[in-house]
Amino acid sequence: MLRHLSIRSKLLALLLLSGVLCIAVTGLIADRSGTKSLRQSIFGQLTTLRESKKAEVERYFGQLERQFVALSKSPDTVSAADAFTRGFDEQDIANVSPTDLQAFYKDKFIPHITGLGVDETPKSYMPTSALSLRLQTDYIAHNPYPPDEKYKLVSAGNGSAYDKAHAFYHPFLARMADASNLSDISVVDPNTGYVVYTVYKGAEFGANLKEGPLAQTGIARAFEAAIHSGSVVFEDFSPYAPSYFAPAAFIATPVMEDGRMKAVLIAEVMKDDLEAVMSADRRWEDAGLGKTGEVYLAGADRTMRSGSRFHDENPDQYYKDLAENGVAATDIARIKRFGSVILNQPTISSAVDLALKGESGTDILTDYRGAEVLDSWSPIDVLGSRWAIVAKMDTSEALAPIGNFRQRLLQVGAAATALLTLFSLLAAGIFTHPIREVLNGVNRLAAGKEDTRIDVSGHDEFSELGQAFNSMADEIAARTEKIEHKTLEYETLLRNVYPDIVAERIKLGDETAAEVVKNVSIIVLSIEGVNALITNSAEDTVRRMNELIGDFDQAASEAGIEKLCTVGETYLAACGLSSPRLDGPNRALEFVRKAALIVDRHAQSWSLPLSIRGGVAIGDAEVGLIGRQRTVYEVWGVTMLTARRMVFDAAPGEVHVTKAVLDQLPDPEGFAKGQSFNIHNAGTVVTWKRPILQQTETGVAAQ
């Protein structure tokens, strides 16, 4: 069939076919590469959010532990524990009757647990000891305040030693519970197991944790663990009868005096605080989680330890999704009853199983709603208890950019095909025009026009067309080669002068390349004694400077640090500018250490008194291209000013860092508090300092 087509039609078909194939192959490669990159970017974002929330949870429990230990060591707490224990044993138990207390449990306590499938007999929750009955009768049954406000009673007015101790110490402990955001604080006699004091006066007040209704509860386990360990312990969430079987977790620690255990201090953890940390105070979208993302915690029993976004935003749809995903109706009913998913919702996710095994990772899985999600998981240690932390987002939202990317790719392909068709039509016409002229000459000669000639010796139209084409092709090839050579030189110069990200933007025509980059570690090094490198020979001076700065550049590259510029004795670099770095401060200090070793080595080699001072700051960096005739890539802002300023205060061989840098170091030991100074628009900056090289490193460098 091709034999019946003209040369123009064959050329047109060839151009269209090859062009469409190139567009298709390029589109396929772009689709696969772009999809992979976008997916990795989304997983990276989820992992960053997961690690951020993980750090917040660890800080929350670490702070809670420190506050609680400090409270247990307070002289007021020690005195209160002693006074409550003695006062409890000295109570007047004559004429104590359980009647009033039984009425309180029947009217105020039992209605809250009705329908939960638990024992609804008041005696099952009341203490049996006469001392405990006296305590609960005076401070609960005869307490005029509502059940949730029993803590407002300061004195029962019976004049007993216990009541005097309560009137004196209760305000202090109530303030401590409020200041530390604790649901309750209890004081327990370590010898008898009696809860001799609580702030909020629940059913555990006066109860015995070694025997009786509370002996198998979380507070009793926390009590026993604190006695046996002699240190701070954490008891994971479990149903707690005094809180109407709502989930409760406890932290406990012994109260010691002169090496003797006076009491055990137990606090109920405020679960609302933990949920606020995980949900960013319910501002999920502001935290970068979009409309379907969330970060949650799960315990060893594979149930939730923090709230569910979907339960808070759309509970009806949430309950429907749980039911369709096989969650038991009893679990759903408990979630509705307590208004909380903690302990009541199974996670039903392999991400949780892997995290509880100590593994971290990312994958596309099915979540507890039965929805397909992008998951990023990791284990988390909560005061000795292993939990799982999972960051996730529905694939319908997370992978939406991939669909948009493919749609745009198809639009570009269609536009390119249309342009290719127009170009092929035009090119085919132009290319075959000389051939038609030759054919017309042949036809004219065949028609008898003898004045038409074709020079067969090489001067005919075909030869001239070939020569013209070859000349043009040779010229184009030569010009293309020159352009490519100049372009390569230009790109090489750009990458030597500017960071990669800026060089790429300049190539694309960006004249300013200005932006604010988050979480950038700025490193400023000052080389002491650099003037000693200057010799009578300019060539020798340049050689030494190139050796020194070249070693700095290599060390920076190995540490993932980007060199900014060298000005005199000052060397400026950054970490996290072109590529985000979660461990930027650690990399920065490692680079400073290597730079100090390089200076020591060269100082010994050249017998010159060289040393360096360093400053490292982390924060936002404003970057851009400055100048029109001689463009310079500049980094400015508070972070750069802080790093530059710290170098002035540093002694030779010393590095100064900001508090933000110190907080992100895995091992901040060796730092001492340094000078403070003011930075415009940033206030007072407190610095921390330490020698760049330890004693052993200095010794090795000297050898």
Image (spheres, rainbow, N blue to C red):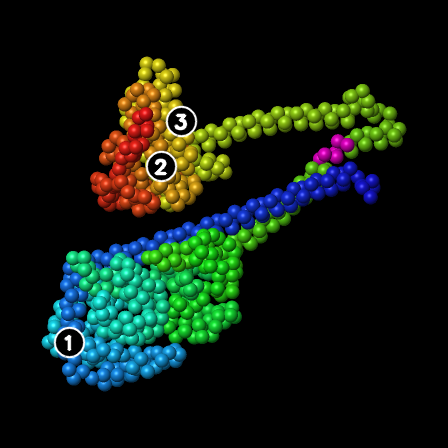
Which type of secondary structure does the marked residue at label 2 adopt?
A: helix
C-alpha gap between disc 3 and disc 1? 82 Å
As for residue 157 lying within the magenta part, the answer is no
User: Label 1 near label 3: C-beta < 8 Å?
Assistant: no
Name which residue type carries label 3.
Answer: Gly
685 with respect to 516 (left or right)? left
- What main secondary structure does the magenta stretch of the protein show? helix
The x, y position of residue 7, in whole percent, is 78, 37
The x, y position of residue 580, in whole percent, is 42, 44
Q: Residues within 10 Å of mark 1 (few under 14, many from 20)?
A: some
Q: Is residue 201 visible?
A: no
C-alpha gap between disc 2 and disc 3? 17 Å
Sequence-first disc among 3 and 1: 1
Quadrant where the C terminus sits is top left
Which type of secondary structure does the marked residue at label 1 adopt?
A: loop
Sequence-first disc among 1 and 2: 1
Residue at screen point 40% across, 41% down:
576
Give the residue number, with chain letter if any, for mark 3: 550
Q: Residues within 10 Å of mark 2 (few under 14, many from 20)?
A: some
Name which residue type carries label 2.
Answer: Glu
Q: Nearer the viewer, residue 413 or 21?
A: 21
Q: Nearer the viewer, residue 402 or 430?
A: 402
Q: Nearer the viewer, residue 97 or 10?
A: 97
Give the residue number, with chain letter if any, for mark 1: 91
403 with respect to 88 (left or right)? right
Point out the stretch of residues depicted in magenta. 430-435
Name which residue type carries label 1.
Answer: Gln
Sequence-first disc among 2 and 3: 3
Give the residue number, with chain letter if any, for mark 2: 590
The x, y position of residue 55, in whole percent, is 35, 53
